[in-house]
Amino acid sequence: MRIVFMGTPDFAVPCLEALIKTHEVVGVFTQPDKPVGRKQVLTPPPVKVTAQENNIPVYQPQRLKDYNAPEVIKELNADITVVVAYGKILPKEVLEAAPFGCINVHASLLPKYRGAAPIQWAVLNGDKETGVSIMQMDEGLDTGDVILVKKTEIGENETSEELFERLSHIGSEALSEALDLIESGKAVRTPQPEGDFGYAKMINKELCPIDWNKSAAEIHNKVRGLQTWPCALTRLNGKNVKIHRTVLSELKGSRAGEVIESDKKLIVSCGDGNCVEILELQPDGKKRMDTKAFLSGNTIEKGTVLGN
């Protein structure tokens, strides 16, 4: 099939690479280059880099409404448009420009977690299972008919970053299978049920502060879900500390936020009397480090209360 691909971040790259191997990718739409880092170096999105390495034409419109994307898709004689984490709302004219329309690789088990951050919210909410849905796009927000679903379990200590990586490859496999079904005329499109099944809103820094009155499981899920950005955050001796990795501890505590062990391990009591062990952290202005390295240079007294 002749495919126009729309995508931007690392998550979309395995899907693009799979399409390059098995189909003819005739054009790639991606977000404009953006300044990155302290020096604000203008940097192309990962999808653009992959497209250019494979000599595929790249289009980077600021606004699809101001750009004749439907005509470009038609001129490229595309059979279908594949969308993976593009980051723009597609108007009806784009959705219908190719004969087979647009399909989307969405990292949740639709209709659950429609929206921008399904992977993070699945982890934040402590879900045991997630997956990838291949959806025929319509004008709604992730409301189109589902063509194919692949499920996977979420590990107890798996972070959003790790789950992103796994789902990007699961997504590429699901996409290849769905395209085979579409091309052969065997694709079954199942309408999604109506109703509110949870919107996966954008992640922001307002979510970062840890409330130690929450249960150990909730705090552990926050740490996993906000990894690697924007990261769970607490106060330690009056200074901000990012918490990068935790595990649930078998020890029991009492006071929420209290350090109950700080010799070779850093274990903190939570609101339900259970505890989390902090494995990796990052003091303000310093690099990420494991707890052993942190404790070798910092004395944390038992009874210290985090969050103050």
Image (tube, rainbow, N blue to C red):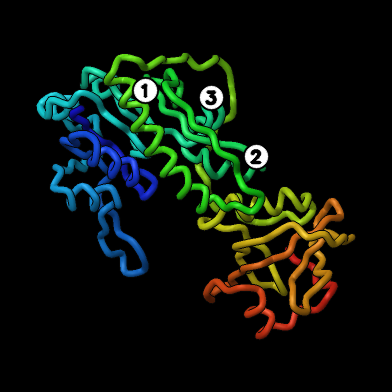
Residue at 32 percent of width and 45 percent of height: 8
Q: CA distance from mark 2 to mark 3?
A: 16 Å
Label 3: element kind: loop
Residue bearing mark 3: 111
Q: Which quarter of the figure is the N terminus placed in?
A: top left
Residue bearing mark 1: 137
Observer-side mark, 2 or 3, equals: 2
Residue bearing mark 2: 128
Q: Residue furthest bottom?
A: 297
Residue 5 appears at what percent x and percent y? 25, 36
Any mark on residue 283, and which? Answer: none
Residue at 74 percent of width and 57 percent of height: 248
Q: Amino acid at mark 3?
A: Pro
Q: Nearer the viewer, residue 32 or 3?
A: 3
Q: Residues within 10 Å of mark 1 (few under 14, many from 20)?
A: many
Dots 1, 2 in contact, CB < 8 A: no
Q: Residues within 10 Å of mark 2 (few under 14, many from 20)?
A: few
Label 2: element kind: loop
Residue 206 seen anywhere in this rendered image of the structure: no
